[in-house]
């Protein structure tokens, strides 16, 4: 490897390390103070750097939110895509819902950023949104395997799953009251979808 290439790799590694430190501080601040209270000045103090240094790696506060969104979406995609070995399509939906609820309730701040869009004037970039799109596509594939193909039923599933997560986070943080309904909710959902698909057209 040439000296020039070694220098480029070192600078890129240093840049990624600095960005990681800033993002870690941003997550810490968001969890303590709320996503909408993120301050670049306080963030710089947390990270042990100056505000101009933050701007050297992130040109705006929304750029930090964008990087946080990408990181959260990538973790979500990986969490949901782990193998579902030996399960039937219906059982996979139940397990997928349990995984979803586990992911959401384990970090309410991350859940708010991904699924509730609480930050005014922030819209994730297409690049940051890509892992979330792939995760949704994977969810649709699991639904199709269970015979759920109607878009209104897909919409109902996303409303059901995020509704359970929101209820758990808001009303029983750290508990299992709504998480424990995963199997029952999935059974009711599938019964409705299958009855609807067999009903004669009006």
Image (cartoon, rainbow, N blue to C red):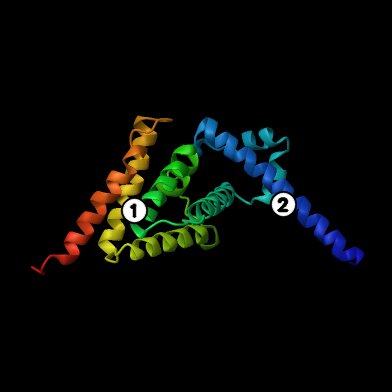
Please tell me which residue is depicted at 40% across the width and 45% down the height of the picture. 98
Residue 184, located in which quarter of the rendered image?
Answer: top left
Residue occupied by mark 1: 158
- Foreground: disc 1 or disc 2: 1
Residue 99: horizontal and vertical position, in percent? 44, 47
Residue 200, located in which quarter of the rendered image?
Answer: bottom left
**If the image is split into quadrants, where does the N terminus sit?**
bottom right
Q: Residue furthest right?
A: 3
Question: Of helix, strand and loop, which one carries label 2?
Answer: helix
- Residue 125 visible, this orientation: no
Residue 10: horizontal and vertical position, in percent? 82, 55
- Which mark identifies residue 184? none
Q: Residues within 10 Å of mark 2 (few under 14, many from 20)?
A: few
Please tell me which residue is depicted at 72% across the width and 52% down the height of the picture. 16
Residue occupied by mark 2: 16
Answer above or below: position of 30 versus 2. above
Q: Residue furthest bottom?
A: 201
Could you give the CA–CA distance between mark 1 and mark 2, rounded to whole angstroms?
34 Å
Q: Earlier in the sequence, mark 1 or mark 2?
A: 2
């Amino acid at each position: 490897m040439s000296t020039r290439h070694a220098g480029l790799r070192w600078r890129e590694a240093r840049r990624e390390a600095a960005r990681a430190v800033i993002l870690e501080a941003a997550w810490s601040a968001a969890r303590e103070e709320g996503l909408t209270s993120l301050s670049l000045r306080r963030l710089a103090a947390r990270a042990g750097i100056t505000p101009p240094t933050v701007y050297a790696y992130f040109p705006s506060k929304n750029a930090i939110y964008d990087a946080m969104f990408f990181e959260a979406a990538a973790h979500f995609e990986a969490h949901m895509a782990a193998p579902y070995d030996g399960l039937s399509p219906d059982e996979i939906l139940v397990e997928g819902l349990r995984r979803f609820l586990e992911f959401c309730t384990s970090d309410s701040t991350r859940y708010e950023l991904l699924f509730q869009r609480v930050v005014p004037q922030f819209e994730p970039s297409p690049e940051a949104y890509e892992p979330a799109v792939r995760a949704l596509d994977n969810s649709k594939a699991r639904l199709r395997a269970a015979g759920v193909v109607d878009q209104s039923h897909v919409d109902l599933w996303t409303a059901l799953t995020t509704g359970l997560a929101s209820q758990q986070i808001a009303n029983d943080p750290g508990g299992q009251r709504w998480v424990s309904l995963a199997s029952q909710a999935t059974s009711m959902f599938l019964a409705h979808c299958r009855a609807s698909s067999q009903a004669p057209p009006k």
